[in-house]
Amino acid sequence: MSLLDKFDLIRKRENVELTGFEDRPVDIEKQLNLYTREGQFYVLLADADNEERITIERMIDQTGCFVTSVSSGMECMMEVTKDMYNLILLSRNMPRMDGIQTLRNIKSSNQSKCRDAKIYIILDEKVDEPDIYFENAGFDGILRKPIDKAILQNIIISLVPEKMLPDDDDLIEDIREIAEDAEALKGCDVRLIEGLKLFKGDMSAYMKAAERFCEEYEVYSADLLDALYTSKNNDYMNMMRSCREAARKIGAIYLADCFDDHVNMAKADTLDVAESNWQSLVTEWEKVVAGISKWLGKTTEVSNSTEILILKTNGIKLKSADIKERAEDVLASLEQNNKEEAEKKLSKLAEYDLDAEIRRKIDQVKRAFEKNNINIAVDILKGML
């Protein structure tokens, strides 16, 4: 194989960067190796999810800590009465005794040898309670699944005796920095480590993509809403696919799954289901955009242009014929290029107590007026006749 052939082969491979004529994996997740010869740090892990427990156990074991893992709160209580542990990780959801009750029992039991241990709760990605709920319960910190290695390593670094830490200050600082960034982004449902893998560890390139994702929010959300209101299934589906891939690229996996749900909704003959789920999608989308913007040090105000409007009514119902007549009046004003008069007539119509379907269409027309999309407004009004 010639040097040029080898060069081309290397360039096409994934997760490698070119260094001369050699390829090497990019080290995204830093490896922490504690000096255990001068002491030991004991970790107890309790998680009913066997696969997740094994994964976390391996992460801890790789640092050089001594780790014991169990699958329930009952087993955890047996361990804390036998041995002393420095750090205890408790899954929120376990059979018979959940993580919160296990914490209480560890702290209150006279037989417990771990009442002074640092105790962290392991949560699923989505929980109903705010962080303060678990802080008030007595936990020293929170770990969210899927657990990022750097975040777990940083917790261990902050707790182990200094004599156990390696002399590599740059390594420690790298772990702390990536953990801080990963923790900040995890709060807005973004997995930094997953995103960095796609950029081969290049934080600068990742940040540019994340910034672009935020900048495109207003345009994409507005265009999607237009496609939704005018029942343009193909346009809606294609834009959702683009949004899905952009979200995955930056590690916003949950949001990407939400976009994917809307892709599937658009494959049906109607977008009614997509519309009913629109606001929940936007809520997650805005959470990601706001969180990333804050992380990037930018002040981004997410506008309410993606909300489906709900207008106040006067309580008076209109007959179907009257609604059509008023819609025709709005159209007539538009045909005369009198947008201001059309908006006034639409506002008058919106004051009445209307069925949900008519209300939705009026909201759509109002949004089209705000964006000066007169053709879209005309299409929607014609659909009311």
Image: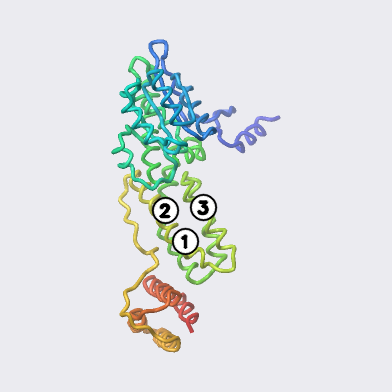
CA gap, disc 1 and disc 2: 11 Å
Residue at image location 40% in from the left, 67% down from the top: 308
Please tell me which residue is depicted at 61% across the width and 36% down the height of the picture. 13
Q: Which mark is residue 284?
A: 2
Q: Which quadrant, please, contains the N terminus?
A: top right
Q: Is residue 251 above or below residue 286?
A: above
Compare marks 1 and 3 and give the one earlier in the sequence: 3
Q: Distance between the residues labelled 1 and 3?
A: 16 Å
Ranked by sequence position, the earlier of labels 1 and 2 is 1
Other residues around mark 1 within 10 Å, as few (<14) / some (14–19) / many (≥20): some
Residue at point 43% right, 23% down? 78
Lower sequence index among marks 3 and 2? 3
- Camera-nearest label, 1 or 3: 1
Residue 139 appears in which quarter of the rendering?
A: top left
Q: How far apart are marks 3 and 2 (CA)?
A: 13 Å
Closer to us: mark 1 or mark 2?
1
Q: From what the image shows, is residue 177 above or below residue 226? A: above
The numbered dot on residue 277 is 1
Mark 3 lies on residue = 244
Residue 61: image tag: none
Residue with the most extreme top position: 37
In the displayed structure, would residue 244 be above or below residue 118?
Answer: below
Residue 165 on image: x %, y %: 37, 18
